[in-house]
């Protein structure tokens, strides 16, 4: 039986590496299937790691009430509201 190993990131399931098919003597014959084995590796891909503030793939969570940026510190804006 032919095998193919596919490595995916454990958290996001994005493709890490798809190995070549390990061929057996029946490779290419009709009705011969290739058995795929999926192996989780690492944690999250670079795309999902960089979006950590918006996703659940990182322990570094940034919490914000909005995406608005102000040059004033949060303490200054607190004083103005009082």
Image (spheres, rainbow, N blue to C red):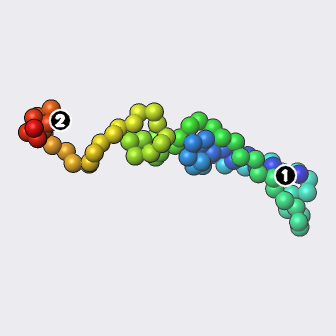
**Residue 36's spot in the image, x, y percent?**
76, 51
Quadrant hosting residue 55: top left
User: Does label 2 or label 1 sit earlier along the sequence?
Assistant: 1
Residue at the farthest bottom position: 30
Query: What mark, if any, has residue 2 been given in the picture?
Result: 1
Residue at the farthest left position: 80
Q: Taking 31 as reference, is 44 left or right?
A: left
**Residue 4's spot in the image, x, y percent?**
76, 49
**Of 31 and 73, the residue lying toward us:** 73
Q: Taking 33 as reference, is 9 left or right?
A: left
Give the residue displayed 70% in from the left and 42% down from the top: 39
Give the residue displayed 63% in from the left and 45% down from the top: 8
Q: CA distance from mark 2 to mark 1?
A: 61 Å
Judge the density around disc 1: few (<14), some (14-19), many (≥20) Cα neighbours within 10 Å. Answer: some
**Residue 49's spot in the image, x, y percent?**
46, 40
Asked if the residues shown at circle 2 and circle 1 are in contact, with their CB atoms under 8 angstroms apart, the answer is: no
Q: Find numbered disc 2 in the image and state the secondary structure of the residue it sits on.
A: helix
**Residue 12's spot in the image, x, y percent?**
55, 46
Judge the density around disc 2: few (<14), some (14-19), many (≥20) Cα neighbours within 10 Å. Answer: few
Q: Taking 51 as reference, is 64 left or right?
A: left
Q: Taking 47 as reference, is 79 left or right?
A: left
Give the residue displayed 66% in from the left and 41% down from the top: 40
What residue is pinned by disc 2?
Answer: 74
Q: Nearer the viewer, mark 2 or mark 1?
A: 2
Give the residue displayed 60% in from the left and 48% down from the top: 13
Q: Is residue 73 in sight in this rendering? A: no
Question: In what quadrant of the picture does the C terminus appear?
Answer: top left
Residue at the farthest right position: 25
Q: Find numbered disc 1 in the image and state the secondary structure of the residue it sits on.
A: strand
**Of 11 and 72, the residue lying toward us:** 72
Q: Is residue 9 in sight in this rendering? A: yes
Query: What mark, if any, has residue 56 been given in the picture?
Result: none
């Amino acid at each position: 039986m032919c095998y193919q190993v596919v490595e995916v990131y454990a958290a996001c399931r994005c493709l890490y590496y798809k190995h070549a098919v390990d061929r057996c003597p029946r490779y290419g014959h009709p009705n011969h299937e290739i058995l795929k084995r999926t192996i989780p590796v690492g944690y999250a891909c670079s795309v999902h790691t960089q979006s950590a503030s918006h996703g659940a793939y990182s322990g570094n969570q940034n919490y914000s009430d909005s995406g608005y940026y102000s040059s004033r510190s949060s303490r200054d804006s607190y004083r103005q509201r009082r």
